């Protein structure tokens, strides 16, 4: 196993938080019977020990690598417990700061009439803060577990966009965008079919898929070919590659095996009836008018994601078209290169972020932890005459669920 030091740091952090939360748990149960406390404490440390064992065996276990569903759900539960304890620990820390403050005041003002002869640990914890910590932490964990039921809860989002330079023949064009299928995460084929049915129900003129068909390997599409090959449109279905499609996040017996996997994945797009755009553009024609559709491989402004995309290959020749649509998987591409270098690209369609599959969205407020990493992370963004839309993703990866940020099929109507 590589990078043992990093994994041990994670384990040490988990154990330290477990110990800290345990002291608070012991305080809250001090009036319970000895039998119930022994049972509760034994269960607490059994779960903690299982979490540590799982993390240490995560990368080295062939069993966990083969049983992806079990691995993902177990990992999600462990991560959920960790963050639940972390939130609870924040409130316990506030209480400990309060206790330390009271103790210091007693040392500074010894004649206050209060007995501060004991150390700070002898000052009683706050029942209120301790309970708040456990309630909020438990609430987060329960929310994450409920999110398991939302991973196939597809929603159609309808967006109307108006452009002054859109040719008359394309007025009223209806586009469906799908992104981030991640077929290797699916466990319910019937539920996935309902999402495809929702996309077909929109009667789009054109369907665009913006990358991440699989998690790692082309074989992940084997059971879903007869689902996604149903996606059709009068003007065609076009696709691009996302960062996961290259197989960069798994081990291969050789460089040749990795290359062969990518070639098979490209062929799968063709077998689905999708036209894969690899750093190139094509002309779309409707009612005698033409616009350009540009598709590039993954290009990210962040160093830990690949830059396979080449606008220098995809863009030349598209200048002659009055309107241009770009499919680029990673939305960081928009600010980093598209806007400053290609100001005549009117509409960019991306995905990648999934909205982190966790957040809050309503007409007045939108938040997700992913916004601290990506300026454009979900929905519609405009700067000048240029428009970016970031699809929240069709599938899921890592956490097998969604909280607040539901899987989507985007429907654009251009005018």
Image: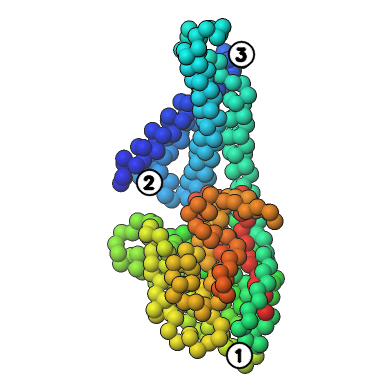
At mark 2, the secondary structure is loop
Percent x, y for residue 286? 62, 88
Callout in the foreground (1, 3)? 1
Residues under labels 2 and 3: Cα distance? 42 Å
Residue 93 seen in the figure:
yes
Residue 103 seen in the figure:
no
**Which label sits on residue 289?**
1
- Estimate how packed mark 3 is, as few (under 14), some (14 to 19) or many (20 or more) residues with alpha carbons within 10 Å: few
Q: In which quarter of the image is residue 152?
A: bottom right
Percent x, y for residue 401? 58, 50
Residues under labels 1 and 3: Cα distance? 79 Å
Q: In this view, does 32 lie above or below 159?
A: above
| Comes first in the chain, label 2 or label 1 | 2
Circle 2 is placed at which residue position? 59
| Comes first in the chain, label 1 or label 3 | 3
Residue at 48% x, 46% y: name it.
71
Circle 3 is placed at which residue position? 31
Residue at 66% x, 87% y: name it.
168
Nearer to the camera, 309 or 253? 309
Residues under labels 2 and 1: Cα distance? 54 Å
- Estimate how packed mark 2 is, as few (under 14), some (14 to 19) or many (20 or more) residues with alpha carbons within 10 Å: few
At mark 1, the secondary structure is strand
């Amino acid at each position: 196993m590589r990078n043992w030091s990093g994994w041990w740091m994670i384990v040490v952090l988990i154990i330290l938080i477990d110990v800290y939360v345990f002291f608070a748990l012991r305080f809250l149960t001090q009036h319970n019977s000895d039998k119930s406390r022994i049972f509760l404490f034994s269960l607490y440390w059994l779960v903690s020990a299982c979490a540590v064992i799982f993390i240490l065996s995560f990368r080295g276990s062939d069993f966990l690598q083969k049983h992806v569903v079990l691995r993902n759900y177990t990992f999600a539960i462990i991560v959920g417990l960790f963050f639940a304890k972390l939130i609870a620990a924040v409130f316990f820390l506030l209480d400990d700061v309060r206790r330390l403050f009271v103790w210091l005041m007693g040392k500074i003002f010894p004649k206050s009439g209060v007995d501060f002869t004991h150390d700070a640990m002898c000052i009683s914890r706050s029942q209120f803060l301790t309970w708040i910590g456990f309630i909020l932490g438990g609430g987060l964990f329960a929310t994450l577990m409920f999110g398991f039921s939302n991973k196939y809860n597809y929603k159609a989002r309808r967006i109307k966009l108006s452009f002054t330079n859109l040719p008359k023949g394309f007025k009223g064009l209806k586009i469906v965008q799908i992104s981030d299928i991640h077929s290797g995460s699916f466990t319910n084929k019937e539920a996935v079919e309902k999402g495809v049915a929702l996309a077909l129900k929109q009667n789009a003129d054109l369907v665009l898929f913006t990358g991440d068909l699989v998690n790692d390997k082309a074989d992940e599409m084997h059971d879903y070919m007869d689902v996604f090959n149903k996606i059709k449109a009068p003007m065609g279905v076009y696709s691009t590659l996302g960062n996961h499609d290259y197989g960069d996040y798994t081990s291969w017996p050789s460089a040749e095996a990795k290359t062969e996997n990518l070639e098979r994945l490209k062929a799968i797009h063709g077998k689905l009836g999708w036209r894969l755009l690899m750093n190139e553009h094509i002309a779309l024609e409707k009612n005698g008018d033409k616009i350009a559709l540009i598709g590039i491989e993954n290009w990210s402004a962040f160093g830990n994601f690949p830059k396979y995309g080449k606008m220098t290959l995809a863009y030349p020749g598209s200048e002659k078209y009055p309107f241009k649509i770009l499919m680029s998987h990673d939305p960081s591409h928009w600010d980093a290169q598209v806007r400053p270098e290609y100001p005549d690209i009117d509409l960019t369609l991306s995905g990648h972020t999934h909205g982190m599959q966790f957040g809050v969205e309503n007409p007045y407020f939108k938040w997700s932890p992913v916004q601290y990493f990506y300026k454009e992370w979900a929905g519609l963004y405009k700067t000048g005459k240029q428009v970016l839309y970031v699809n929240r993703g069709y599938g899921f990866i890592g956490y097998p669920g969604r909280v607040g940020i539901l899987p989507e099929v985007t429907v654009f109507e251009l005018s």
